[in-house]
Image (cartoon, rainbow, N blue to C red):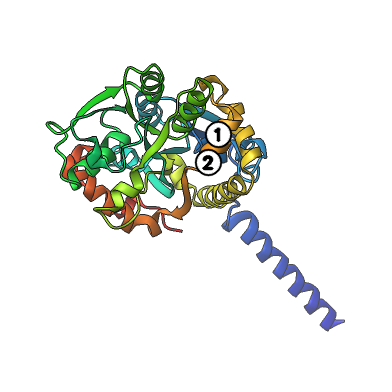
Amino acid sequence: MKAWKIIVAGFLSFSMVLFSCTGNNIPVPSKLDRIRLVGTIGPMSIPLAYMKEHHRLASIANETTLEIWANPTQLQAIITGGQGDFISLPTNSAAIFYNKGVSLQLLDCSIWNILYLVTSDTTINSIKDLKNKKVVVPYQGAVPDALFQVILKQQGINSSSDIEIIYATDPVQGSQLLLSGKEKYVLLSEPAATSVILRGQSSSSSFTRALNMQTEYAKSVAGGTPIAGTVALGPIKNRPDVIKTFVSEYRKAVQWMLKNPVAAGEIGARILAEQGFTSEVLTQSMQNINWDFVLAASAQPDIEKFFNALMQVSPNFIGGKLPDDGFYYKE
């Protein structure tokens, strides 16, 4: 009988300790009411849309929303206003906001090339072939302009005297200038480049991706071009459990997209219908993007090399200085 009492007492003590650990001393993280995803006009929004449609974040949030930013002004308003939790954007834009004191952290780099020179001129085989020509570049001061100017400088072309850069307000205007015949050389990111080429085919105009900006960059600078990734913004940085789940699900979403380009194009068309991108355009566009999910800490050497190259043209392209180690997410 005495032994039985000891066993019961021991069981009760264990139960009290277990209850104390799970209920009192180690609180279970609360589920968020909502996670706000923010994507760009382009394929980077497809993994986010997949996560939303398939409730991939249901374990950490009751609701997942997705908003699309259309231009740098909208992006700035979203970032500075804290209007999102996880946001896809160019890596140099993330650095600019970070250097201005915005509370954010780069989680990954997923896009390593998305930019092409599109033209009907079949004689263009290198950047040097653009000497004494006019080139349309969307978004003055943004990543297409920054990368293009780095490549020009590295290959010995003076952007003020050897070439004339015409700035378009956005890729839509740049595409219209090319399709109308008003301009012959336009720097376009995907999916705009694919869209222009397909539209040209329907009107008997033959456009091609004459130059791949990653290839041109690699002629002078070793390493890749870490163009864009995802950041965690504001208070969400204080939820490592949420960030870990997001990173894991985003990686899976990118893998799903690459294995299922047709279905991914259909998802993209649903969220980008307002911008006129069809599933066909988005599916074909993915074949011309260098996707590679790399955690920010692992991509840091390539990112810093890329940022240093941008700074040689203008420190403003990354906000004046290299971001410190706090900029890079580490698992």
Q: Is residue 100 visible?
A: no
Could you say whether the residue bearing mark 1 is in a helix, strand or loop? helix
Say few, some or many: other residues with alpha carbon within 10 Å of mark 1 (under 14 / 14 to 19 / 20 or more).
Answer: many
**Nearer to us in this view, 33 or 163:** 163
Location of residue 121 in the rendering, given as x and y in whole percent from the top left corner: 34, 31
| Residue at the disc numbered 1 | 282
Residue 286: give its label. 2
Q: Can you say whether 91 is above or below 160 in the image?
A: below
Q: Can you say whether 264 is above or below 71 in the image?
A: below
**Nearer to us in this view, 316 or 238:** 316
Q: The N terminus lies in which quarter of the figure?
A: bottom right
Place residue 209 in its image quadrant: top left
Residue 256: give its label. none
The amino acid type, in three-letter code, at marker 1 is Leu
**Nearer to us in this view, 322 or 145:** 145
At 48% across and 24% down in the image, what residue appears? 200
